[in-house]
Image (cartoon, helix red, strand yellow):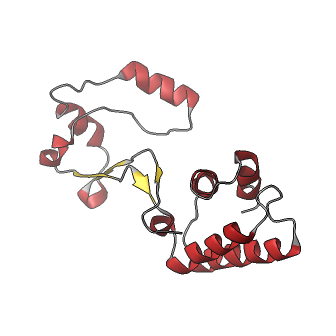
Amino acid sequence: MSDLKSIEVFQDLLLRVPGGELSSARSALLKHVAGQWVHAPEAEKTLKRNTSLDGDVIAFQPAGADAGFLVEVTSSSQSLHDMSSPEIAAALSRFSSAANKSTGSTHPADRKRWMHFLVLAHQSGRDLDAEFLARWLSEIEGWDEESAHDLRHRI
């Protein structure tokens, strides 16, 4: 598996409030919405109704830094090395390249390699996102979606 391989992911916009003072964060964000961005209260209602979001959804441009917020936007693509260590990535690559992609981890040798990958991932203490793993197996490693998602449920 090459470090250059990656899958397209939704970017996260992370706002960090120095000192953790969140009480005035919403009003400060709304105050700094400018340019082409507008507050979208109807979108907030829809998202809250259709997702498990707890907070508000506010559109603004990253000029919010002058309001005392640190703004970070994550990458639009992620590689397996972004999500795990090189050792874990190598274990997944060994499993994927040797496994029967139509049966997943049912063969004893495939199961042993899969379990080795899972143990390494668990011992690392890093959260390995099951949805990312299924997409990786499907989009990069060539697994069919059903088999990739079956493995996802075995994490």
Which residue is at 55% across, 26% downward? 49
- Residue 139 percent location from the top left of the image: 58, 51
Q: Relative to residue 11, is residue 106 depicted above or below? A: below
The quarter of the displayed image where residue 59 is located: top left
Left or right? Give the position of 129 relative to 115. left
Res 125 visible: no
The quarter of the displayed image where residue 87 is located: bottom right
The quarter of the displayed image where residue 128 is located: bottom right
Pick the front one: 5 or 81: 5
- Residue 18 percent location from the top left of the image: 24, 58
Pick the front one: 131 or 98: 98
Q: Quadrant of the C terminus?
A: bottom right
Left or right? Give the position of 23 relative to 117. left
Residue extending furthest toward the top: 42
Left or right? Give the position of 119 relative to 1. right
- Residue 102 percent location from the top left of the image: 80, 55
- Residue 44 percent location from the top left of the image: 42, 26
Q: Relative to residue 82, is residue 68 depicted above or below? A: above
Which residue is at 20% across, 31% downward? 33
Res 68 visible: yes
Q: Quadrant of the N terminus?
A: bottom right
Q: Relative to residue 49, is residue 109 depicted above or below? A: below
Left or right? Give the position of 137 relative to 5. right
